[in-house]
Image (tube, grey):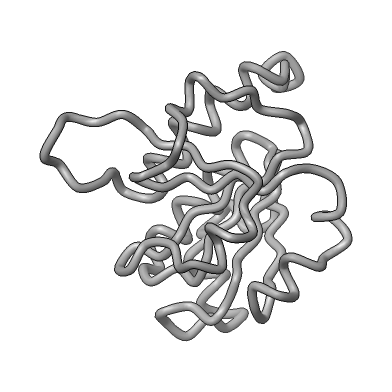
Amino acid sequence: MRLALYQPDIPQNLGAAIRLSACLGVPLDVIEPCGFPLTDASLKRAALDYGDKARVMRHASFETFATAPEREAGRLVLVETDGATRFQNFDFSTGDTLIFGRESAGSPGELYRAAHASVRVPMVRGLRSLNVVAAAAVVLTEALRQTGAWEKLD
């Protein structure tokens, strides 16, 4: 299981995603360019004291992410407000990568075309979306439960 952020706009969300990935033992892929300067120093600042505990991989573009060796096995599961399936009704696999679009613009067509599936978090009608890391935590929790990964923690 992996998390991927597509061109994140908000450094604090990247920091929260790094912490989430470190605490749950899930690698995080950051697909650039970001909406803020992503230098080694800013990445360290965003990660706080979790940087050395997280497995963060930076990709210069979606193409380099899509062709990375760790992407060879497993599906790309797009988490989006208009996802085809409620996340709790989807059958997750250990090799899945959960990918999230930009906070400001959502997911572009290339993510929809590349995804093997899309899921959504059900919400109260009329509300737009959850914070990207809150949505990641919700969906990742279910994916880890289904794949038995919770038992490997602690």
How many labels sit on residues?
0
For residue 8, above or below residue 123? below
81 or 45: nearer the eye? 81
**Relative to 62, residue 114 above or below:** above
Q: Is residue 25 left or right of residue 67?
A: left
Query: Is 44 situated above or below 80?
Result: below
Residue extending furthest toward the left: 126
User: Percent x, y for residue 76?
Assistant: 66, 48
* Percent of width and height locating residue 43: 55, 71
The residue at 49%/54% (across/down) is 100
Quarter occupied by the N terminus: top right
Res 154 seen here? no
Q: Quadrant of residue 152?
A: top right
Q: Residue 98, how many percent across, how many down?
A: 59, 45
Percent coordinates x, y for residue 126 in the rendering: 11, 39
Q: Quadrant of the C terminus?
A: top right
Q: Classify residue 153 as left or right of residue 127.
A: right
Q: Quadrant of residue 96?
A: top right
- Residue ID at (43%, 27%): 86
62, above or below 79, in the image: below
Picture residue at 36% right of the left edge, 68% below the top = 10
Front residue (pair 118, 133)? 118
129 vs 80, left or right, is: left
